[in-house]
Image: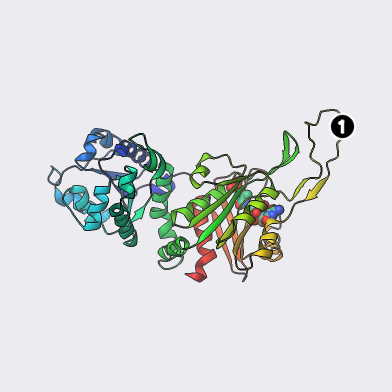
Amino acid sequence: MELSKYLKGKKIIFGITGGIAAYKAANIVSALRRAKADVHVVMTKNALEFITPITMKTLSENNVILDMFDDHGYVTHISLTEIADLFIVAPATANCIAKLRAGIADDMLSTMLLAYNKDILLVPSMNDNMLNNPATQENIEVLSKRNINFVMPDYGKLATGKVGKGRFPEIEKIILKIIELIYVKPLINSISNNCFDKLKNFISSKNFCVTCGATREYIDPVRYISNGSSGKMGFAFINAINSMGGKLKVIAANYTDSRIDWFNPIRVGTTIEMKNALMENLKDIDCIIMSAAPSDYRIKDEFTSKIKKGEDYINLKLVKNPDIISEVRKDYKELKILGFAAETDNIEQNGFEKLKKKNMDAICINKVYKDQIGFNQDENEIIFIDKNNSTFKIEKMDKEIAAYQVLYYLFKDSL
Ligand code: PMT
């Protein structure tokens, strides 16, 4: 994803508070600058114990704001809150979160936070007991209800050496959230008047299952039939749903990008394994997104040893795999099913027929050809058709952005 497409010229206030993860803020500020955002760093007194203002000034290419009453003055700093597109605090300590909830403004950062009336993104990072403390949990809950955004900490090794929840999240997760707030939110709001928050609330109340990747049907122990699906489209849905607070089950077929591990995926190899994994996990699911590319056929009698080179021709007998969507629909009549159609020609007609034949609620039709379009690309162009024949064309764009648009079209009648 070319970040400058979304962040170029955007004004971002970047608060850093005093936690061990403060040094990680440097990488985010650096990524935002590379994407040509105009970044203004504000550091608390405690943050200075962990990272120097010179580092942040060098990376942001702007003076760092430290003091209420420094040379540039209180009014200059406060006026920044009127023009900034986003206010991030990363890491955000328990103290910073508590102050924002209580409305305390006793230093420059907390004062600017109170003065800011657009999107705020907090990235908490702290000791797991501090995070789990009912006071911190309640503060996060109250701030979430006030539409403050969070990228919550990961589970992993903490500063004390202990393993728990509290670790500063992967930087890519934070960047994707920044894109959501700066670019996707206005985009969805422009399609329909202020619908982003409604969509987010709706998604956060639902349970999703997303499939991604390409299944493999083994011919012999080392060779298989598969296709070029990388799982990128599925990952884009997983990110969008997770970011908007939806609960997720992920079924990943031969997916190699390690980011999928953030979501504890159920890993499968073949189409039959994918079908079984789905059937075992659909209880409580409200919506499935079938972006995976399962193979329609498997080898009738898989060779138990590697086939030796010899004959000019060998015959492979293929047998039809179950159609996963049709099987799921038989047992789950109320489930919302979004399918995909990977087509090489006559795409709209073929996709439409699949929508009807498999009894889906909606379908995303995309053109695929070898690995040039659709498969393993960062961008996709989609024709979305629902069961009432409403059609929306999503122009060629990054899959991460397209996923939000598809979710909007899928649920717009429920918002
Ligand atoms: O993963 P990427 O590299 O990002 O590429 C994305 C993509 C092009 C793979 C994706 O956008 C896509 O089109 N996925 C569906 C590919 C596919 O299997 O299309 P199909 O037309 O063969 O199947 C139609 C639908 O039925 C799909 O939702 C598929 O998941 C489902 N299916 C297919 C076969 C099968 N045996 N059972 C199924 O349920």
x and y, in percent, of residue 190 in the image = 43, 64
Residue 54, compared with residue 318, is above or below; it is above
Residue 237 appears left or right of 41: right
Q: Secondary structure at mark 1?
A: loop
Give the residue drawn at x 54%, y 45%: 378
Q: Residue at x 61, y 71 (%)?
A: 388
Q: Is residue 306 left or right of residue 126?
A: right
Task: Reply above or below: 11 against 207.
Answer: above
Q: Does the rendering let one see residue 94?
A: yes
The residue depicted at 78 percent of the width and 35 percent of the height is 304
Q: In percent of the image, x 40 and y 46: which residue is there?
A: 174
Residue 136 location (% of width, % of height):
29, 52
Mark 1 surroundings: few (<14), some (14-19) or many (≥20) residues within 10 A = few
**What color scheme is it?**
rainbow
Q: Amino acid at mark 1?
A: Asp
In the figure, 408 relative to 249: above or below?
below
